[in-house]
Image: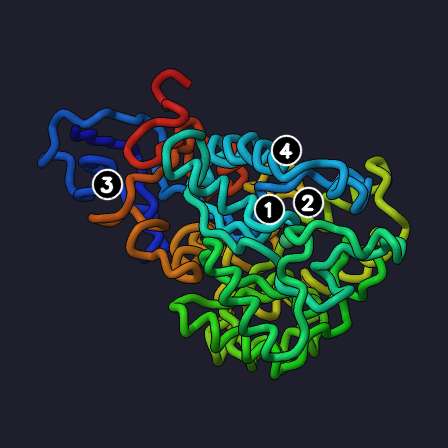
Amino acid sequence: MTIALLPDRVFDSIAGEMVSDQVIIIDNGHVSAVKTPSQAPDAVRLEGKTVLPGLIDVHTHLATAPDNGQGYARLVQRSGAQDALIGVKHAGETLRAGFTTVRDIGPWRAFADVALRDAIDAGWVEGPRMSCAGAFVTCPGGGGDITGLAVDVDDVLPKELRFGVASGADQMRSTVRQILRYGADFIKVLATGAVLTSGTKPGAPEMTEDELRALVETAEESGTYVAAHAHGTDGIKRAVRAGVRSIEHGSLLDDEAIDLMAERGTHLVADLYDSIYIEEVGPKLGYSDEVMTKTEMTAEAQRQGFRKAVERGVRVAFGTDAGVIPHGINARQFSLYVENGLTPAQAIQSATRWAAELMGWEDSVGALAPGAHADLIVIDGDPLTEVGLLERPSGVMKGGSWVVDPLTH
Ligand SMILES: [Zn+2]
């Protein structure tokens, strides 16, 4: 079945520019051509509208109940089945907001994300294409562990809540192999402490360079890569030197860290909207004083580091940490990327082409190019003049089928 769409504008995410007078031809769920309208007289006219590639968020947590300030209690109050099923709700919200692909950077309960991904791919539930981390690789008591429990409770947690807890290079290697064996697409490591994990310090490194190297080598042997959560400067540098493909958060970057990332082509995935959201609603939701203090400590520094990294030419990929912010409002982050140094076109590239490159999925998503999945969004008006328009897509197509139909919306 063939569909032809003729909007006012099409965003070319490879060149980073808007083009007009182009019709998009879709065959069997894939883009077959983007060409002049005279060659396709029966196109559906989308007057006043812009078509862009479906958006990509490279840092989501779909298969985890939202943290509304209950801290880790919520993790043991819910079953794995409940986590997977709330993931179904989050996946639908994400897709309808125009995000047709996500890189899901870990559930607290290992492999709930993999179950969700497989259900979406099988067509059982509606959601974005997912690339999954499966579990968090973290040191005992680290940013991806369940911390703050009494000693006699600590011992009896189910294995899936601590699947990726490891220390020493040998354990890193076997943990990577196990995580990939159960269906993960890439490896997520916590190289420093975390803002939301009680008792851990975002600035403190939690992995040696040797451990990080073992992770990267083992992932690469299996044809994949490592993404590193890292707030503190030392942890960021260790991870970049060890060869991780992306730094998540990157809150405390210094010039040396930025230079290293620029030289090595490491992507920066900065969740700039996250801290603003936590500052706004955290106290109402009952976040602890510890979390609020750590958020304040990292927020402005993260924005400054982002601006410097953009100036230095570090490649940015759009990641929101959705799960901390509610799913479906991911696009609110575009205006922050623009306020902090990216042009509107670059901000959109960070959520399309550059995100796809980080994932190694650039042949199938992130651009409206022949052979790619027909994943696209329709925006009323021109998002290059008002990037906030991306928060309200009037059409969403995944694999050639409308999820939100722009003609009836
Ligand atoms: Zn996260």
First in residue order: circle 2 vs circle 3: 3
Whole-number angstrom distance, CA of label 4 to CA of label 1: 14 Å
350 relative to 398, above or below:
below
Given the image, on which type of amino acid does mark 2 rest?
Val
Which of the two discs, 2 and 1, sits closer to the camera?
Answer: 1
**Does residue 81 appear to the left or right of 201 in the view shown?**
left
Query: Which sits in the foreground, 340 or 195?
Result: 195
- Please give the residue where the numbered disc 3 appears in the rendered image: 30
**Residue 17 marker:** none
Residue drawn at x 59%, y 66% is 228
In the picture, measured across the screen, residue 326 lies left or right of residue 127, that is right
Which residue in the structure is indicated by mark 4? Answer: 82
Say what amino acid the circle numbered 4 marks: Gln
Q: Which residue is mark 2?
A: 324
**Residue beneath label 1, please?**
61
Separation of disc 1 and disc 3 at Cα?
Answer: 27 Å
The numbered mark, 2 or 1, whose residue comes first in the sequence reads: 1
Q: Position of residue 9 (x, y in %)?
A: 31, 38
Give the residue drawn at x 41%, y 43%: 129
* Amino acid type of the residue that numbered disc 3 sits on in the rendered structure: His
Q: Check whether the beta carbons of the residues at disc 2 and disc 1 lie within 8 A of each other.
A: yes
Q: CA distance from mark 2 to mark 1?
A: 8 Å
Instruction: Give the residue displayed 70% in from the left and 59% down from the top.
Output: 144
Q: Is residue 394 above or below residue 314?
A: above
